[in-house]
Amino acid sequence: MRFCDFFIEYKIGLKNIDKKISWMDLPKYRKIFMIIELIFIALTVIFLALYFLLQSEIFADLFLIGIVMVVLVLLIFMIFDSNKINLKKMLDGYYSVCSYNRMNMLKNVLQKYSLDAKDVSTIDLLIEEAERAQKENDPFISMKKSAEALGAGIIPIIIYVAKEIAEEFSTGKLLYMALLVIAIIICLLSIFFTVVPEIKNLVYRDNNIYNDLIYDLRQLKIFSHQ
């Protein structure tokens, strides 16, 4: 009997719990907002494509209007969704049910491995082991260390090249190049911080499950004594 067996048991139990709300179970107002939002997103993409194909300014204006409408609909939805009545419906109809099922599943797994759900020290040991296993199995940690070492070697080269370039160009030209480099770096960082987490979740799929387990164990620790 090992932690990896316990973790696999938890993964199996988690698969039996639907964490997403199906389309049929969605509240009517959410369905309406989602349909409207998808329509505006589709129109925005079409206007952008037509602008590039026909080079007509009217489609550029329509594209900007489409973006404004997408953001506006989203803001209205967020305000409407945070209404007290709607929050109560979601709590009673989905959140409470999901939480109850997950806590029961976790208690059943603990019971199967003869572990006391009310023993704080046991829960703490499980949390520590989950955090350790998550780090040990993370393939991106070694990649991060390699990237840091590579960056440490590249930075002196960049500084040297920058000095050489500075001697060749005027101040105005250097300022323009600096702004261009900053803009490129911002774009690259935006792409990096958007894409890398998705790639990590795709390659290291257990990462989120470890997070779920750690979160559920902490919730059990808090509420099992109530």
Image (spheres, rainbow, N blue to C red):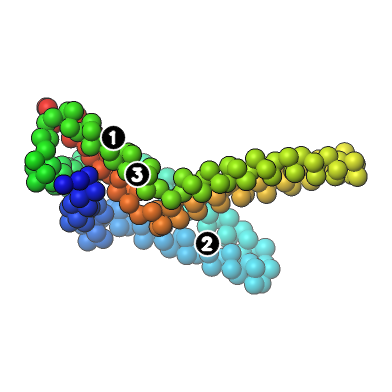
Work out how far the residue at label 3 is from the one at label 2, CA to CA, in angstroms.
Answer: 41 Å
The picture places residue 207, in percent across and down from the top left corner, at 35, 48
Q: Does label 1 or label 3 sit earlier along the sequence?
A: 1
- 91 in relation to 118, above or below: below
> SS of the residue at dot 3?
helix
Q: Does label 2 or label 1 sit earlier along the sequence?
A: 2
Q: Amino acid at mark 2?
A: Thr
Q: Which residue corresponds to the image point at 30% horizontal and 53% vertical from the top-left? A: 30
Q: Residue furthest bottom?
A: 53
Q: Which residue corresponds to the image point at 19% horizontal and 55% vertical from the top-left? A: 12
Task: Name the quarter where the C terminus is drawn.
Answer: top left
**Residue 102: quadrant of the picture:** top left
User: Left or right of 25: which side holds 64?
Assistant: right
**What residue is disc 1 on?**
128
Q: Amino acid at mark 1?
A: Glu
Work out how far the residue at label 1 is from the one at label 3, CA to CA, in angstroms.
Answer: 10 Å
Q: Amino acid at mark 3?
A: Gln
